[in-house]
Amino acid sequence: MRKYLVLLILAALTGLLVLPVSAQEALPDWIEHSACEVDLTGSTIPIIHFGDISGSFAFITQPLLVGFADAIDYFNARGGICGATMIQDNRDTGGDLSQTQAAYDDYSSREPKPSMMVLYASADAELLREQLIEDGIPALISAGSVEGLYGEDGQSPGWIYAANPLYVDQFGNFCEYIGANAEQFPAPVVGYISWPGAFGEAAFTPEAIAYCAAQGVTVLPENESFLPISTDITTQVQNLVDQGATILYTNTLASGPVAVARAVVDLGLEDTVQIAGVNWTLDTSVGLLSRTVIGADGLPAVDGLIGSMPFRWWTERDQPGIQLITEVADSKEPPLEPQNRNIAYLLGWSIVDLYVEIYTQTANRVGGLDAIDGAAVNETLSNFSYSPLGLYDLNFADGVRDAVTNRIAIMRFANADMSGVATSGSDALTLPLADGTTAFLPIVVPVTEFEETPDLRPGGADVP
Amino acid sequence: MASLVKQNQKIITPLLWIIGLIVLVALFAPAIAEQRPARLVQSGITGLLVGGVYSLIALGIVIINKASGVFNFAHGWMMLFGGFMFYSFFSVANISPFAAGGLALLTVLLAVTMVGALRALRDGRTLLVAAAAVVGVTLLLLVPIPMLRGVVGAICGGALIGLAVERFAIRPLIGQPLFAMVLMTLAASELLQGITQMIWGSVELPLAVFSPLREMGIPTPFRFEGTGAFEGTIIVRTELLAAFILALLSFAAFVAFFRFTSVGLAMRATAENQKLAQAVGLRVRVILGVAWAIAAVLAAVAGILQGGATSLSLNLPLLALRAFPAVLLGGLESVPGALVGGLVIGLVQEYANLLFPGTQAGTELAPYVLLMIVLVIRPDGLFGQKRIERI
């Protein structure tokens, strides 16, 4: 009898041990992480992120944090990183570089030093580039200033790896598109209007201007700038239009493109001036903020804005990564809000997926979590080739530090039956709001396939 | 030589002004001559309208300064707080009666106790008036007219914050060095930043306060097509025009308030010397409370107008920094100075944007250069009181 009792207890104990493993859900087959050769169960891996969570970038960074949280929950429930649990460690710098420095000093002085960080702004990248190299800490970023990623000479790859193409390369890619569609954009003249600073000015370089000229696109030699708090930018827009600009290109986000669109609409230039911009101008935030700036056709003024879309987008439901993220977003209680269904939320997911793959590869190579430091992660990254959730492709081999594929897309708004794009306010899908205005559903319509961006760093292969 | 200059100072000073003006005109004449007249007019209009917003912000700062001598660094956050209060009552369909009642109760309580602590409510008449005010404000906050709800909510929220800052941060420092109060406003701004973020988050919000104008058939903007020498489009942004008109009305009201009302005169006396004002029987606490409440409501109005012209974001308080040159330019305690200062800064900014395209002269440089020049010539600003201290 006692023998049976012991066997029963042993069976129960075994069951308890096995239960968590068997309760663990499996990742879908199409997520092709490297197989774990080590067991990191019981340890935690922090995703350290510091950036502007409350300033001009908040519309982007808030959904990023939600994306982090949802993706971390998802992957942790499916084994984490070889059993290790990921946790979020966010800090707000408010877009203040002194706060960025303070946050970095705090994190980098910890023992052990972080083996990787996540940044989110060109200015932060430029500030920390040399310090990261010196401290031996690699960083992932969703920004693309040449100086931050490749140094002032454009040919010195650092320890920061970007999930999107360089802003200057995006501008070049945009000029390719404009040049190739001469019937739609005859004699195009681009006026560059942006926020001052590392992000805003990142694409306005002599190399980009020369490359655009080679595509048959004139870029005005003087750019205009405005602050995110500017009450009115009519004068800056008129300056460019007076010089002959037929296209206004902006390296801003959230309210930035809306301010440009407002000035264009107010001046009655909707039919003669095309608005365009960096990948962030196609973000959901821009479409939602523009509901108070309506064009002559009754649609938000940013309807028709042309920009870069180097990632898969929410409407591409046939892509498994988008399918997965949409399922999780819809199954949340309450479902993910419209303002969070943006680029940054997708990037949040992709960065967590990158963490899983980067740490799995590194742990496999060095034999465990304790042996992972910044240098080991950097070694992995410097030869890293991966497509996080299939949302975009990365290949950091041969000194590349950014994503090098892009496509051009147009911001439109969904029509009433969601079967296509609205042509005017009257056939658009609208949601009446309590303040008497109407919300429109922004969608992004790609007009080119993914293609390699030109290399427009100083001394880059495609600089004329 | 020195005595010669001193004797002829009345002639030399205006002469220097004229020479300076001639140099300025000569410097900018070629750039001005290159511009189309329509552009010059457009920049003038835009500058004046944007300047109107600066003036409104500057006015709030000046009122606090006039009453208490304190330069309020929390003004920007008061603007945003008021703007968000408006948003909450304007943009939300179903207002919770508890939220409306709570706001009304807190505001009325702070207003009533501004005079004589909670014991003021022991008086039956005061209690009745306070209760009626709470019920009245609550009902106004619940009426199904978003604009009215928004305005009442913003006024209540603004007054509440103004009174709270005065009551809990400034009042304990009465009689202490002014510097301590100024530092306290910095602390208040940090606190307001935290509160704002906790309640409304960090994400930018569009404020559709001017959308009804379009529905009413009012053009947004007013657009004029010039002909001949004035060929080109000239626009007047309706929302900025509204802000400008509101700024002018506020100025007229406050000039009259400070000149002709006893409370206004008492405020000026309090600003001059709080201890002396208290000694002659002025109720300094009440005066300070009223000043902070008025300034906070003005800040809320500026926040709503700026939020409507752009959007409500945590960047908005930075706009107060743009108004600081306007305040200093006009003179720290001058109401007309705030108006003139704001308009001049707006004009200088826009003309710098026009005349120096491709630079950041308008956004970053010109207002501050002008401020430096004026302060060198007139350290108390254009309309500031010249301070003479006996040693």
Image: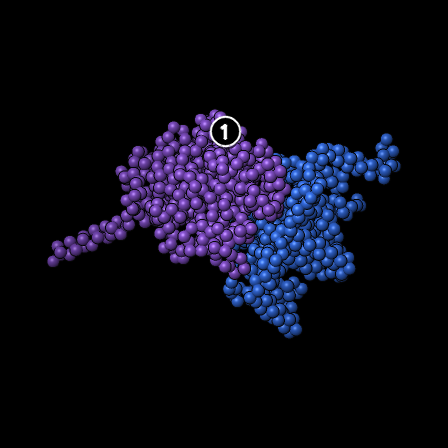
The residue wearing badge 1 is: A214
Q: In the shown orientation, is residue A12 left or right of residue A297?
A: left
Residue B363 at x, y = what percent? 63, 40
Q: Is residue A383 visible?
A: yes
Residue A232 at x, y = what percent? 61, 46
Which chain corresponds to the colour blue? B
Determine the residue located farthest toward the bottom in the rendered image: B124
Task: Classify B222 as above or below B369.
Answer: below
Q: In the shown orientation, is residue B95 left or right of residue B73?
A: left
Determine the residue located farthest toward the front in the rendered image: A183
Q: In the shown orientation, is residue B104 left or right of residue B382?
A: left
Looking at the rendered structure, the secondary structure element under dot 1 is helix
Q: Quadrant of residue A227?
A: top right
Q: What amino acid type is highlighted by mark number 1?
A: Ala
Residue B150 at x, y = what percent? 58, 60
Q: Residue at x 31, y 43 (%)?
A: A31
Q: Chain of mark 1?
A: A
- Taking depth in this image into account, of A3 and A238 the one nearest to the observer is A238
Q: Residue at x 38, y 46 (%)?
A: A316
Residue A168 at x, y = what percent? 49, 34
| Crowd band around label 1 with a 10 angstrom C-alpha radius: few (<14), some (14–19), many (20+) | some
What colour do you see for chain A? Answer: purple
